[in-house]
Image (cartoon, grey):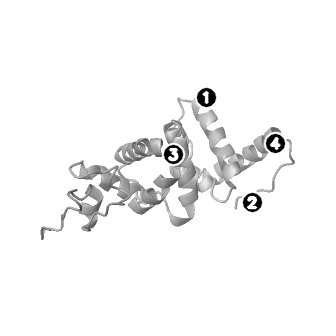
Amino acid sequence: MSSSGSSAVAGRLPCVACQQFRRRCQPCCAYALYFPAGSDPDRFRALGKAFGASNVARTLPELPPEKRHLAVDLLVQWAWENPDCRNMVTWHSLKEFKELLLVAVAGRFLDVHRAFGAGYVACAIDGMSREMGRVAVGLLVQWARLHPERSNVVDLDSFPLFQGQLMLAVALQWSITTGAPRPMLPLAS
């Protein structure tokens, strides 16, 4: 083992993430597949700064295995395009982040982000059930695809109105789709 902190495990060099964290890269390392030794360390730094490396590591196993590399590539691309964004995912919005990542690997994330901003969408669907969150994201995807010329339609001042309108649209869509009475939704404050 070398004394430089980049010791190899079973003949394998530590991944970029473990080099950044200055720790030994274990065989079950969550980052090794996506940031292997010798890859660009700026990719991992950008991802960690924007989303939090641990949030990404917790979320990736919940995605279909064949979509995980795509998810990492999309997140890195987003982080590079938005270098001023930090800590986009907080503990309370981790569930919504997972939902948005599932949308991302389905090829619809960039449309939603362009139109509304991923952070605003995650906050807007916070507190909704998983099914209603999917309805909400589906409605936002439809709107974004119908209006490709519109971008950044939500800002801090208009967020409460956006959240209220989204909840109303989800309730209406839920009622139409299921034939059930409109579900109770928390009122936007």
Residue at disc 3, secondary structure:
loop
Q: How far apart are marks 2 and 4 (CA)?
A: 20 Å
Residue 7 image position (x, y, % from top left):
18, 65
Q: Distance between the residues labelled 3 and 1?
A: 28 Å
Query: Going from the N terminus, do you reach mark 1 or mark 2 first?
Result: 1
Query: Going from the N terminus, do you reach mark 3 or mark 1 first?
Result: 3
Disc 2 or disc 4, which is closer to the eye?
4
Whether residue 92 is situated above or below residue 157 in the rendered picture: below
Residue 79 image position (x, y, % from top left):
38, 48
Residue at disc 1, secondary structure:
helix
Residue at disc 4, secondary structure:
helix
Disc 3 or disc 1, which is closer to the eye?
3
- The residue sitting at the front extreme is 10
Residue at disc 2, secondary structure:
loop
Q: What residue is pinned by disc 1?
A: 146
User: Which label number is shown at residue 64?
Assistant: 3
The reply to whether callout 2 and callout 4 are in contact (CB within 8 Å) is no
Q: What residue is pinned by disc 2?
A: 186
Instruction: Check the picture and name the quadrant holding the N terminus.
Output: bottom left
Q: What residue type is labelled 3?
A: Pro
Residue 57 image position (x, y, % from top left):
43, 58
Q: What residue is pinned by disc 4?
A: 178
Query: Going from the N terminus, do you reach mark 4 or mark 3 first?
Result: 3
- The residue sitting at the left extreme is 3
The reply to whether callout 3 and callout 1 are in contact (CB within 8 Å) is no
Q: Which amino acid does label 2 sit on?
A: Pro
